[in-house]
Image (cartoon, rainbow, N blue to C red):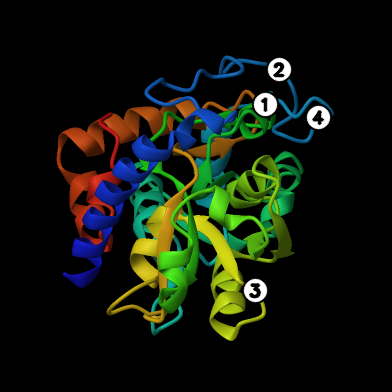
């Protein structure tokens, strides 16, 4: 219940923050309110993701059904993908991936990847998709066949709660040393705003840097902040201040993969029958859902 309240309050606060500071206009990698177009038809030629052009000759859908598993590339990113006390992957994205795999009559297999190498992991065939709160940037859409967006998000600034009053505008952030996940939308925002930063392996690591005092601030996804920052969370001594942009999440497949169309249809069906909403409620991301 605490996470749900934090999530809804955070999304509302971000909307006000981004309207006030006009920061959404600084983003060059978003496609808000528009469906992401497939970069290739499902019949595009190639050799199942291993050709030099990264396209798929045989049906990726048929291939995963034949092997019985959908291999999903992820990182540890609460509330989207993280492990429970028994070591099982859960979260909004993990549960949706599991449900999608089940709709194909197979199982989902989760593989942790280096986020900066996600496109390479996909094109090499090590994974079948990237499903981990992935921002639909121009770079991502250029290297993958992406699903329609399913969640709204933003990159936000995290600072120690005791210093929050000092950092309420973008201009006030100059001079701080940030921790950001390498290859992430947070790193992109740090670059675009000319901020000094240290790249770390994941967003959880960025929060640890701030909590330990080795970085002044972090830039992370608003959905992660709702789950991990503030009262009742793992980092109750930290808080969020400035919203730097607005963005959308999508799932990435190999170029030409027919799994993209299969997932878009699954999204429509699961949104219509309430499955997506129920899973979102479980992880406190219901305020961020995009109608399918």
Real-space Cα separation, disc 2 to disc 4, in angstroms:
9 Å
Of badges 3 and 1, nearer the viewer stands 3
Residue at the spot 62% in from the left edge and 65% down from the top edge: 202
Residue annotated with mark 3: 215
Among the two numbered marks 1 and 4 on one chain, the one whose residue lies closer to the N terminus: 4
Relative to 221, does residue 61 appear above or below in the rendering? above
Question: Residue drawn at (43%, 68%), measured in percent from left and top?
Answer: 164
Residue behind mark 2: 45
Nearer mark to the viewer, of 1 and 2? 1
Label 1 – label 4 distance at C-alpha: 17 Å
Residue count near mark 4 (Cα–Cα under 10 Å), binned few <14, some 14–19, many ≥20: some
Q: Earlier in the sequence, mark 2 or mark 3?
A: 2
Residue 1 x %, y %: 16, 69
Whole-number angstrom distance, CA of label 4 to CA of label 3? 42 Å
Secondary structure beneath dot 3 equals loop
Q: Residue at x 81, y 29 (%)?
A: 51
For marks 2 and 4, the one nearer the N-term is 2
Q: Using residue 235 as the reference point, say whether residue 12 is left or right of it.
A: left
Q: Is residue 195 visible?
A: yes
For mark 4, what is the residue?
Answer: 51
Residue 72 seen in render: no
**Mark number for residue 178?**
none
Task: Give x and y (percent) for residue 267.
Answer: 32, 35
Q: CA distance from mark 1 to mark 2?
A: 17 Å
Q: Secondary structure at mark 1?
A: helix
User: Badge 3: how crowded within 10 Å, few (<14), some, or many (20+)?
Assistant: many
| Mark 3 vs mark 1, CA separation in Å | 33 Å
Q: Of marks 1 and 2, which one's residue comes earlier in the chain?
A: 2
Q: Quadrant of residue 90?
A: bottom left
Could you say whether the residue bearing mark 2 is in a helix, strand or loop?
Answer: loop
* SS for callout 4: loop
Q: Position of residue 150 (x, y in %)?
A: 36, 37
């Amino acid at each position: 219940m605490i996470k749900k309240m934090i999530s809804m309050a955070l999304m509302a606060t971000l909307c006000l923050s981004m309207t006030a500071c006009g920061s959404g206009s600084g983003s060059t990698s978003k496609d808000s309110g528009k469906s992401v177009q497939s970069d290739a038809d499902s019949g595009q030629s190639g050799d199942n993701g291993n050709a030099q052009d990264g396209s798929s000759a045989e049906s990726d859908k048929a291939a995963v059904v034949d092997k019985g598993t959908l291999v999903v590339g992820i990182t540890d990113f609460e509330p989207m993908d993280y492990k429970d006390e028994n070591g099982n992957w859960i979260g909004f994205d993990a549960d949706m991936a599991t449900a999608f795999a089940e709709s194909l009559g197979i199982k989902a297999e989760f593989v942790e990847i280096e986020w900066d190498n996600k496109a390479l992991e996909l094109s090499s065939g090590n994974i079948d998709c990237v499903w981990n709160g992935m921002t639909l940037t121009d770079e991502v859409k250029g290297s993958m066949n992406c699903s329609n967006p399913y969640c709204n998000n933003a990159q936000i600034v995290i600072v120690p709660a005791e210093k929050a009053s000092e950092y309420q505008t973008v201009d006030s952030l100059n001079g701080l040393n940030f921790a950001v996940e390498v290859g992430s939308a947070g790193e992109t925002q740090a670059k675009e705003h000319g901020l000094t930063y240290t790249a770390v392996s994941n967003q959880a690591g960025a929060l640890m840097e701030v909590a330990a005092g080795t970085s002044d601030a972090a830039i992370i996804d608003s959905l992660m902040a709702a789950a991990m920052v503030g009262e009742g969370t793992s980092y109750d001594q930290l808080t969020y201040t400035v919203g730097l942009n607005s963005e959308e999440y999508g799932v990435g497949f190999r170029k030409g993969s027919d799994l993209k169309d299969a997932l878009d249809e699954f999204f429509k069906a699961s949104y219509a029958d309430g499955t997506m909403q129920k899973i979102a409620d479980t992880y406190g991301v219901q305020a961020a859902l995009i109608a399918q």
